[in-house]
Image (cartoon, rainbow, N blue to C red):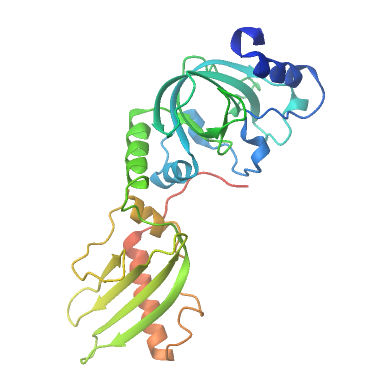
Amino acid sequence: MQRVSSKNLLGKSAAACLFFALNTAFPLVCSTGWAQNGVNARPSADASGNALAYADLADLASAAPLIINAEISQAISLKPEQSAGVPAGFRRAYITAKTEGLIRGDGGVAPNLSYLYDVAVNARGKMPKLKKQRVLLFARAGTRPGEIQLVAPDAQIPATPSNESTVRSIVAELLSAKAAPKIIGLGDAFYVAGTVEGEGETQIFLRTDSGDPVSLSIVRRPGVEPRWAVALGEIVDEAAATPKPGTLLWYRLACALPPALTPQSVRTLSVPDAEAARADYKIVLAGLGPCGRTRTVR
């Protein structure tokens, strides 16, 4: 790869950082990449253009104060000694890009950006051509104007119409005043048997990062399929529908709920009531389906 003068790519401070990275034997300490942030997600196959699951995009969008639509201007491969922690099959690159649009970010971003990214190499150990590729960047601001830090090593993905449309819908829900809170665990479960055999109702409270109330209710009636719903508030609305896959509420539940009720959640219930609550919880999990994450975390 032909080396491009850093003075043509970067401002004065960033050029000095790149010169240090390319010409010394010390680890890279520039503030343009994710490497300083302790992020442990491994670059995933999406860099090749494969479709990401909704949960993957929601994970990235939730973690990123900046989501940028950009076009890569140049990618400079760094020396191995400047690429500590890069997994096998990848090479760290110093990338500059032109901002094409901002999907998330209150303060805006510079028209020209620079950051670090681990690129999958081919069988000969060569990086693919990245110049002029349109990408979505999930990032936070760096310490200098125009510098950004990816929120994860794989937080650059192809800006396909599908990816962009899904990310925009996720961001719209995240920023909504009615956004579903993040689930951080299970609270107490309660079960009330009905007056006839096969009738009963379970209510399971969930713990959230914001402290906002969220609960699951499962109702059984003789001769009909059990029905469950989610309440985002103190009042359980029996007319509430189950969350649709590919929505923020579905993601919050499907990707956070544990595979079974914990002993702590049913500690106040009798043995039969606890078993009924556990069975009803399985109905919720089956209704949600799998989270579907595809990104690898080491």
Q: Is residue 247 above or below residue 155?
A: below
Q: Position of residue 186 (x, y in %)?
A: 46, 70
State whether residue 111 appears in this view: yes
Q: Position of residue 293 (x, y in %)?
A: 46, 48
Say which residue appears at 37% left-offset and 41% top-offset: 171
The quarter of the image holding the N terminus is top right
Say which residue appears at 29% left-offset and 66% top-offset: 231
Say which residue appears at 42% left-offset and 50% top-offset: 292
270 horizontally vs 193: left or right:
right
Residue reaching furthest to the right: 25
Say which residue appears at 31% left-offset and 53% top-offset: 178
Q: Is residue 175 above or below residue 146?
A: below
Q: Position of residue 217 (x, y in %)?
A: 30, 73
Residue 279 versus residue 248: which sits nearer the camera? 248
State whether residue 1 appears in this view: no
Q: In terms of image quadrants, where is residue 198?
A: bottom left
Q: Is residue 79 above or below residue 294?
A: above
Q: Position of residue 26 (x, y in %)?
A: 81, 27
Q: In terms of image quadrants, where is residue 25?
A: top right
Residue 194 versus residue 236: which sits nearer the camera? 236
Q: In terms of image quadrants, where is residue 135?
A: top left
81 horizontally vs 286: left or right:
right
Q: What is the number of callouts on the image?
A: 0
Q: Is residue 218 above or below residue 257?
A: below
